[in-house]
Amino acid sequence: MIEMRDVHKSFGSKDVLRGIDLKVETGESMVIIGGSGTGKSVTLKCILGLVHPDRGEILLDGQDVDEAQDRDAFLAKFGMLFQGGALFDSLSVWQNVAFRLLRGSLKKPKDEARAIAIEKLRRVGLTADVADQYPAELSGGMQKRVSLARAIAADPEVIFFDEPTTGLDPIMSGVINDLIREIVVEMGATAMTITHDMTSVRAIADKVAMLHAGKIRWTGPIDDMDGCSDPYVDQFIHGKAEGPIAAVR
């Protein structure tokens, strides 16, 4: 579904991506791990076309993303769960969930969009009475569920999860991880997640890619991660202070 071939991206004198090669199969859940500032978010932005690589190719279902003629139709293939939730404070919960269904190429009648939003809210464990509340009236865990409902509202082919458990307690993190796994399997969607949370990695991933200094150090099935001999992977997944990844002091 997604293929990156020798993708490079620099900002001024800072080289962020230095030749990314990565394949994500249809229906697969790929988790990208790595320290802060290693290029994980830039990788997602390049796939979405929000940032254009300096060189290299990115293919979505065999087609170059830079050659997408209908930008709106291209983006309709994606759902996104943002790190901070990114809910609109001025919109009710159902309007947040149905945001894409109320505009653009996916536009539906208001009543139909509301019904879909309530259905998606139920799918993430929220009742219909939440629909007319506003984000500020909800707990952090409920807001994250609303964000997840919005990510799946249009039944996307590909879903991106950006640090999905940031700011949540361990129990709610587990709930969100379970929901993500269930929904991805249920929808048959292709998923890409970036996270520092190794509990999330083990709960969500089919495959893992370790990104460091703008390059993929290792990629493989989740079951092979703990036995991986790569020193970067070993240091990161076990949280070791000593190793090839220098701590920022």
Image (cartoon, rainbow, N blue to C red):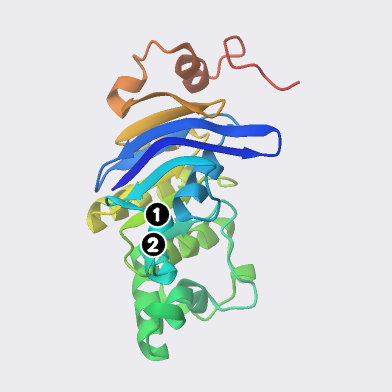
Q: Position of residue 217 (x, y in %)?
A: 44, 22
- Evaluate whether residue 37 shows in this view: no
Instruction: Answer whether labels 1 and 2 touch (C-beta < 8 Å).
Output: yes
The amino acid sitting under disc 2 is Ala
Relative side of 225 to 38, left or right: left
Percent position of residue 63, x then y: 31, 53
The residue to which callout 1 is attached is 65
Nearest the viewer among 67 and 81 is 67
Q: Residues within 10 Å of mark 2 (few under 14, many from 20)?
A: some
Residue 60 can be seen in this image: yes
Q: Nearer the viewer, residue 186 or 79?
A: 79
Q: CA distance from mark 1 to mark 2?
A: 5 Å
Q: Which residue type does callout 1 highlight?
A: Val
The residue lying at 40 percent from left, 43 percent from top is: 57
Q: Is residue 75 above or below residue 201?
A: below
The image position of residue 169, as x and y in percent, is: 55, 44
Q: Secondary structure at mark 2?
A: loop
Q: Is residue 46 above or below residue 249?
A: below
Relative vertical location of residue 200 with respect to residue 235 in this rendering, above or below: below
Q: How far from the left and from the top, in percent, is residue 45?
A: 52, 50
> Which quadrant would residue 17 be assigned to in this image?
top right
Task: Give the camera-side residue of 142 and 227.
Answer: 227
Q: Which residue matches tag 2?
A: 68
